[in-house]
Image (spheres, rainbow, N blue to C red):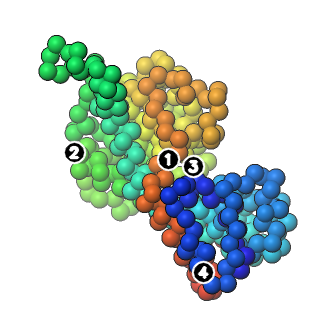
Amino acid sequence: MKIVILDDHSVRQDDLDWHQLEQLPNVELTTYERTPANLTVERSREAEGVFTNKVVFDKAIIEQLPKLRYIGVLATGYNVVDLEAAHKHGITVTYIPAYSTPSVAQLVFALLLHVTNSVAHYAEENSKGRWTQSPDFMWMDTKITELEGKTMVIRGMGNIGMRVASIAKAMGIRVVAVSNRTDLPSDIERATWHEALKQADILSLNCPLTEETREIINVETLALMKSSAIIINTGRGPLVNERAVAKALNENRIQAYCADVLSVEPARKDCPLLTAPRCYLTPHIAWASSESRQRLIDVAVENLVAFINGNPKNVVS
């Protein structure tokens, strides 16, 4: 079976490999670090199966690939594939569920602690000799905030949201969920979106991007929040109106905005968040620990083997 991986670099980086796929019997593997849109068809033309992370397979592309029988999405989100077109042409599409939960939850708190404790700031200043110049045994020039007793609102209580809630509770943080989930633990409170925003010291966005959740942080919802609120977005960039958030930061109407995602990636030079004060951005790395990427590869291989054996799993089309 001819298999092509169209954009393996983001998953593999320099520390992992695809030896599990290479060792599968009767599999002929070709890999590309990156594939521009104009080469997708050419590189996939002879393939019976392809793996894609961000390379798009829309209706027009799928219709040009009559040999294609399998698309393995190397991510939890599978919006890069036109599922209706794939189904029409008898193509099985699979995804990778829940592989990055620990890593994403970890970054939520790395971002939060960056704001509340300023560890990077103090470490950098001390490397320049700041502490050696202090007239006292200590020095500080930022506000340090204790998290115990604060209220964290979590929008989206899937695997990641539940893990974030668990860590927050262990730190003594009150957790309020905005979710339709019916089996929330008894120590997690529930509130409507607008009620929750008024209470939030910290807001963690862990919900998927849908028409309902697009730009749920906007001029109106920001107006409901405390000026001391910290917003953390490790979900999807378009969950927020970036211009409204940048304006709120510039006008000191929220304390900080932390995000691992933007509405357009890689970031555009004119993105208003790049120059907003107290805005802390990481380049879509929440999922990218070595352990998380290895889990992704393991599941991708399992998905392909299951498909070859006639019992596909993690199927979305």
Residue that mark 4 sits on:
24
CA gap between label 2 and label 1 equals 27 Å
**In this rendering, is residue 61 above or below 228?**
below
Identity of the amino acid at label 4? Leu
Identity of the amino acid at label 3? Leu
Other-residue count near label 4 (Cα within 10 Å), few / some / many at <14 / 14–19 / ≥20: some
Residue under the point 69% across and 60% down = 32
Other-residue count near label 2 (Cα within 10 Å), few / some / many at <14 / 14–19 / ≥20: few
Identity of the amino acid at label 2? Gly
| Disc sitting over residue 181 in the figure | none
CA gap between label 2 and label 4 equals 48 Å
- Disc 1, SS: loop
| Disc sitting over residue 285 in the figure | 1
Left or right: residue 7 versus residue 115 is right
CA gap between label 1 and label 3 equals 18 Å
| Disc sitting over residue 172 in the figure | 2
Using the rendered image of the protein, determine whether residue 250 is visible from the camera's viewpoint.
yes
| Disc sitting over residue 209 in the figure | 3
CA gap between label 4 and label 3 equals 36 Å
Pointer 1 or 3: first along the chain = 3
Give coordinates of residue 144: x percent, y percent.
26, 27
Pointer 2 or 3: first along the chain = 2
Give coordinates of residue 105: x percent, y percent.
39, 51
Other-residue count near label 3 (Cα within 10 Å), few / some / many at <14 / 14–19 / ≥20: some
